[in-house]
Image: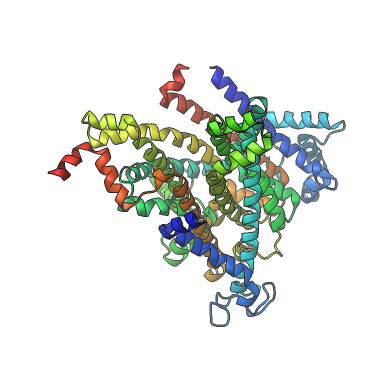
Amino acid sequence: MSVIFSVIKGNWKAQIGLGIVSLFLIMALAAPLLSPYEPQRRVGMPHQPPSSEHWLGTTRMGHDVFTQLVHGTRTSLAVGFGAGLIVAALGTLIGISAGYFGGKIDEVLTFFTNVVLVIPNLPLLLVLAAFIGQASPWVIMIIIGFTSWSWGARVIRAQTMALREREFVVASELIGEPKWRIMFVELLPNLISIVGINFIGSVIYAVLTEATIEFLGLGDPTSVSWGIQLYNAQNSAALYVGAWWEIMAPCLAIGLLGAGLALLNFAVDEMANPRLRTFQVSKKMKRLMLQPNRVKEVQA
Amino acid sequence: MVFFLRRLTFYLAAFLVAATFNFLLPRLMPGDPVSMMFAQAGSTLSPEAMDALRATFGFVEGPLFMQYLAYLKSVFTWDLGMSVFFYPQPVNEVLGRAALWTLFLVGTSTILSFAIGSLLGIFAAWHRGGRFDSFFSPLALVMQSIPAVVLSILALFVFGFWLGWFPIGRAYDLELDPAFTWAYISSVLYHAALPLGTLILVQVGGFLVTIRNNMINLLGEDYITMGRAKGLEDRSVMFRYGARNALLPSVTSLAMAFGFVIAGALITEVVFNYPGLGKILFDGINARDYPLIQGQLLLITLATLTANFIADLLYVVLDPRLRRS
């Protein structure tokens, strides 16, 4: 734990990322306290610009945009983290199994993974969502979770195969540890950074994809989420009638949350791969090391 | 040769999975698949057209397996049925017309962002930890996580509505007839500026980060030090020793990203009202035009698989080790 704190302390990307994500978490938890209105109730005139009464204006239906935004944060975070968990769990399970067992199991799993990887994800999700009808955020979460694990599985398999022949794994096998224990107690802790990166990456992907599916009109228009806000704004031609606040608010929220999570991911990546960690001090050292002729200049 | 045959078999299998998905999904849903799929079609389509549509999607008398074969037959003869929304045009025709615009957007933006992203990434890796790297690499990663839908809407708002610099819809001026004239081409480019710019912004970050990280890992290798020790110029070590090898994984990611790029293009087209696949799809989804939605899955899968196959070929050209084995 103290290691994590010390890394966060010296890493501005981790700090900003964590700050943004915490902000959204607080917004989601405190949604009813932040706004006096109900998200789905007509509380003002249609298309009112931002004012002290309606911080981010109102929609064509007279809904309060700020209220919808904070309540939508709940949906987006829940869908994002839920789908991210499914993706990370499936990817890890399939990746470790393929990498550890090898042979026929690996062949079958890898083939399966590659097929899922190569079929474009969004068109597939659109077909699924179209047949389900008006997909609620939870349904969207599940279908994203079960169609997007292949990238993680592939990366984790490769890393498992690299670890598989190491002494500690061979030693555990010789002691006679059960296979599941080797996979999840011996191997998994060594993969934790990749699993973490995969998880955060999947959360970003899920948040964006949910918004995209709903924006395209395959979501349930009565639910409260950022994607539905965008869909309603697009449908009521918000930009064309000058109601920029209706469409800008969810847009910026999605962008900001995505940016925060991406910064967090960048920081985790740097923790795991010290070569990518580029501090000012080491830069000077590296340049000296990499450019022998410069050493002379410095010495002279 | 064996390598290519194996890849081809794999792509065929992947395509088959997508087709099977299309086949099974309506049959797995509760209720009668025929009435569900063609619910919107009842009033517009003639009885003969309905029968043809049923046959295309394998709703024939007989066991499931025979239905599957019937469906596969229409898929492999590229008979995607009639569009319900654009009746009486076949899905094939509707998608084909729109696909040209999407191909134009996707192709141009991918080539440009690959070139820009790779150059910037090489530069960032070379001066890693420097001012350019510390600012642009995190920025690229952040840009990558901002979805096409948000960037498109922002671009449309700022440059289309607020500043009014660019048109806010269509692919070219409607007063012009498509022809090989400067007026027409400039109009196409002018209308494509915003969607293209957005798609480049969406993609460029990914290429930058990939090649930067590859290159940083490579720059620690002995042969780079060797190149320097030989007294080669910075530039030839950077491009001939470092970048050439760092580009290899980018080619794979180029092909794998193809699906994402098309997805981005679909959204961008909806926002900019651009007459590509995305716009057609948006109309199709709102009308619950199932033949059209299923057809786009097959078309985009086929395009992605082709892109992957081309990447396989390119890889052999770029990596001499593969050629020998």
Q: Could you say which is closer to the camera, residue B90 or residue B289?
A: B289
- The x and y percentages for residue A193 are 53, 46
Residue at figure coordinates x 86%, y 31% from the top left: B63
Please identify the quarter of the rendering in which residue A223 is found.
Answer: bottom right
Q: Is residue B113 visible?
A: no
- The single residue placed furthest to the right in the displayed view is B62
Residue A240 in which image quadrant: bottom right
Vertical placement of residue B243 versus B284, above or below: above
Point 38% across, 32% down: residue: B245
Instruction: Decide if residue B90 is on the left or right side of residue B300.
Output: right
Q: Would you say residue B295 is visible in this rendering?
A: yes
Q: Residue at x 73, y 56 (%)?
A: A134
Q: Position of residue B101 (x, y in %)?
A: 52, 44
Q: Quadrant of residue A170?
A: top right
Q: How many marks?
A: 0
Q: Position of residue B281 (x, y in %)?
A: 63, 48
